[in-house]
Image (cartoon, rainbow, N blue to C red):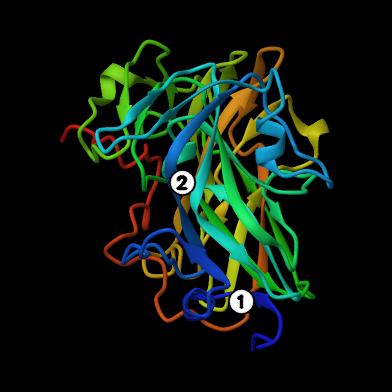
Amino acid sequence: MADENTGVLADSQLSALHNSGEIASTSALDSDQIQPASLDLRLGFKVHRIRASFLPGTKRTVSEVLAQPGIEMHSFDLKEKGAVLETGCVYLVQLQESLRLPMDVSGRANPKSSTGRIDVFTRVVTDQSDAFDDVPSSYRGPLWLEISPRTFPVLVRPGDRLAQLRLRRGHPSEMTEIIVSIDLDTSENRPVGWRAKHQGGLIDLRAIGQHDVPTFWEPLYAQGGRLVLDPEEFYILASREAVKVPADQAAEMAPIAPELGEFRAHYAGFFDPGFGTNTGGSRAVLEVRSRDVPFILEHGQPVAKLIYEPMSTKPISLYGGKTSNYQGQGLKLSKHFVLPK
């Protein structure tokens, strides 16, 4: 039974924090913004193109760093029709949500699944911080999102949700790790993955199911259960294992030891309670990028780990409802694409 005093906060607890003003926002929350164990974060209204990524350090705010010469290249307002964020550039956007956390509540952010699957790299930045994506207990202040499209330019608008925040009370006393391996099984003569095409074109984040797969992606077929990753190419692959997350736990995908391979797997790492539980298990989709040299992946090779931790209380709603895009998934691209039948 989950300890009511510690663990990841569930949807009802996130709603209570919002009602009390400890989670604040510049506009009313969207009806589906609170997930079973996380809060989606919405883009604000001004984009800063910056020269390079930065952390403000423990004595400065993000705004103070932005005001220094040589940091911001230019800024522009996000209109309702949106603006294009180009590949190879780094942007910083203040989010519509801000925090006034209790002394025993801290947070961690992650890209949403659909963000990672289109190779858009995001990190949350807070004032007086020396680490990305971590929100310390008692934090009071704004949230900023660093955005860097790697392969495809993206069309964004105010209110778009590229990242999510998970809050927890106290420190987890019970955590379980499960190693996840890669599925390169060729027995069914099916693609084992997808490789992004660099000249695929623009992705409109609100055009769900409206992007042509062959324009953006090349199917991959492993030879003898083996796949060569080329440096700086982006791949969508799937785990060999079917993943389930019980109702009283939340999970996060994390890197395994770096000595096991020169690649990065899984940008977007949160798995909510209920993931895979009503379908017999769902595969973990992995966003993979090789770093400096070509690297050979083989079927069953360990690529990441799932870390399970207890919920503070069970969520009212579990993953798998009408707004869940990846329940029961196998090898699946982001919701922006629909494979032809």
Image disc number at residue 235: none
The picture quadrant where one finds residue 9 is bottom right
Looking at the image, residue 162 lies above or below residue 14: above
Image disc number at residue 113: 2
Marks 2 and 1, the one that precedes in the sequence = 2
Looking at the image, residue 329 lies above or below residue 38: above
- The amino acid sitting under disc 2 is Ser
Q: How many other residues sit within 10 Å of disc 1, few (<14), some (14-19) or many (≥20)?
A: many
Looking at the image, residue 333 lies above or below residue 104: above
**Image location of residue 168, percent across then percent down:** 66, 70
| SS class, disc 2 | helix
| SS class, disc 1 | loop
The total number of labels drawn is 2
Residue at 68% of width from left, 41% of height from top?
62
Quarter of the picture holding the C terminus: top left
**Image location of residue 326, percent across then percent down:** 37, 52
278 left or right, relative to 90:
left
Residue marked by disc 1: 311
The picture quadrant where one finds residue 182 is top right
The picture quadrant where one finds residue 212 is top left
Looking at the image, residue 39 lies above or below residue 241: below
**Image location of residue 159, percent across then percent down:** 36, 48
Residue in the foreground of this view, choosing between 229 and 253: 253
